[in-house]
Image (cartoon, rainbow, N blue to C red):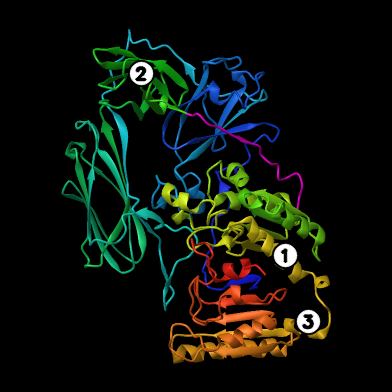
Amino acid sequence: MKKLLITLSLCSMVLALRAQMWNGVDTLYGNEWIDFDAQYLKLSVGEDGIYRLPSAALEAHIPASVNANQLHLYHMGELVPLYVSTEGPLGTDDFLEFFGKRNRNELDNYLLDDPENHFHPDYSFFSDTSAYFLTWKTTENPVRMVDIDNDISNAPPKEEYYIADYIYQVSGAFTKKSVDIGTAEVQQSYFSDTEGWGSGYGGGTLRTFSLNIKEPYTTGPETECTVQFACRAGNHHQVVRFNGVQYVDDSFSGFFGRKHTFTLPTSTITTPSTMEFVGIENSLDRQSVSYMHLRYPRTFKFSGETSMVFTVEGNGNEQYIEVPNFNSGSNLPRAYDVTNGYRLTVIKEGGIIKFVLPPATGPRQLALVNVVVGIQEIQEVEPVSFVDFSAEPAQFIIIYNQLLAQPYNGTNWVQAYANYRQNESPNPLTTATAEIQQLYDQFAYGVNRHSISIRNFSHFLKKEWPDIRYFFIIGKGREYRHIRLSDDLALANGINFFVPTFGVPGADNLLFSAPNTPVPFAPVGRLAATTPADVKIYLNKVKAFENPAFNNQTIADQAWKKRIVHLGGGGDAFEQQLIRSHLEGMSSIIQNNTFGAEVTSFYKTSTDPIETTQTSQIKNLINSGVAILTFFGHSSPNIFDFNFDDPATYENSGKYPILFSMGCFSGQCHTDAFGIGERFVKADD
């Protein structure tokens, strides 16, 4: 029943990535805005709009002595204008209001070599949900949204249109570039210009989309249109048509993402309009379309809407807005100038909403809401206590999920592992633990499951702690594409997903690598645990493996540490002979150097998918003790083409080999299944 301690895979390909978050002035790690002496409340936002936070949601978290004029709201490390209904303590009917935005690509861009060519610039790789953090302090001036009067008595001429953004998102199928290495195509783990969601490549060479573009101001300026798509390997000739008129003619070769921007007469926009993407090179000239963005002049007809977000270009003077047929219900709606921090109650005459904005220059983002149903109310907040990781340097850092630290048999086994590593192991190291939710909140601005959380954290520690030796992740990971949607996440979170990895295919080394290299700046490992019991089992094996005091020190008892088993697979006679030749070369090296190994080799001789004839001999050897088990052949995450039985059948307690697997996918532990390596590592004695 017993088990392999460490599984290594030599199959994945990874490349370098960009440096830390660079804002043009400083290198950021995501926690620069935090006051570690302050308390914070986390608010979650899933779409753009005005949000209200009633005092009832705050009374259990904010001391009664705190005045509303001490409250501050942060998003992505920046202060956000906050409306407070009182300057003093929050009473029963008091509330806070702010404009909230869903998560887009702000953090994703730091993972890309070329953010300008993000395959889906309006759709995050990880989540739609963004986070806002509310705190209270007197050491900093708050940023406020304030009420202003709405005087239309001497209003200037009304604005005829504004420039609207119509975005058509396509997110039906995941796509990612493959790289031709001569004998095969492989995917690299860094984020590429074709990575993300789109229409997929099936269904032929023509794709047609119906665009519901509302209320164009047809006598206004031209419309600017941006489209993005990707094509696979081969020659391509792609054309793009809007309402039957061709605007893009693009010939190229290879697996690339393409971005085109063109203008079209606004007078040609109809409701609906049609956008066509056509591959005319050949029958395989297909495309995955991700994004269509039209910036067009639009009238202020918001018929039937209860909440609208729009942008008006400030001209340095007062600006007068009229909105017909807005659904305001029985109350007067409210307008917000989000950019400049204004809030005003509009006037309604003859079914037309009217308001005047103070002078401003540049784009001003506005919101118009029905005050009853157009404002989203937040009922739950989450207290957050930020940890100052710069305070106590450590050498061995454990990143874990708090679900795996729940008591099992009365013990927190994550902490037990940390205690062992620091106090009991043969080579004690100062040890620190970091819970993954803390990293999301502190190093990814509260965006859950974002890989940049660990990447920023690790590089922050590299800067702050001079003697980092190792990182160790406790918790199974998943590739982000399989936990992006809420339905997928519900089937994974706390079941087979605990701590994120980096990219597709998942590559933990890229969470810790320095700029321009795939090599992590400190060694990293992961225990793909899904229960606290997994951590307990692993810790017991580590103790037995590392501590000689647990073992008899006679030659007979220690001889197994010189034994090595080679397993050679292959799909046909040619492959089998080639693999055998390589393994024999390895055998010669390990037997004739200072290790002085005793190597036993087993080679596949049939063309059957799996070799089973030598299973009992292999099993007997492993039961007697083997230091290293090397496999070279075909494999998947769940099986080798050379069978050596299920881990539950072994009886090698205390004699755990290291497994080297030179086969595709065998080390891929970031799936919903439990692979060979995971099963051996987590099998109980």
Name the foreground residue: 589 vs 417.
417
Q: Is residue 540 left or right of residue 336?
A: right
Furthest toward the left, the residue is 244
Q: Is residue 611 above or below residue 366?
A: below
Look at the numbered disc 3 and give the secondary structure of its residue: helix
Amino acid type assigned to the residue bearing label 1 in the image = Asn
Instruction: Provide the major secondary structure of the magenta segment.
Output: loop
The label number, if any, that marks residue 662 in the structure image: none
Residue 417 on the magenta span: no
Tag 2–tag 1 contact (CB < 8 Å): no
The label number, if any, that marks residue 558 in the structure image: 3
> Which mark is nearer the camera, 2 or 1?
1
Q: Position of residue 21 (x, y in %)?
A: 56, 48
> Which stretch is magenta?
378-394
Q: Quadrant of the C terminus?
A: bottom right
Amino acid type assigned to the residue bearing label 2 in the image = Pro
Tag 3–tag 1 contact (CB < 8 Å): no
Read off the residue under disc 2.
Answer: 333
Read off the residue under disc 1.
Answer: 540
Q: CA distance from mark 3 to mark 1?
A: 19 Å
- Graded by Cα atoms within 10 Å as few (under 14), some (14 to 19) or many (20 or more), the crowding at tag 3 reads some
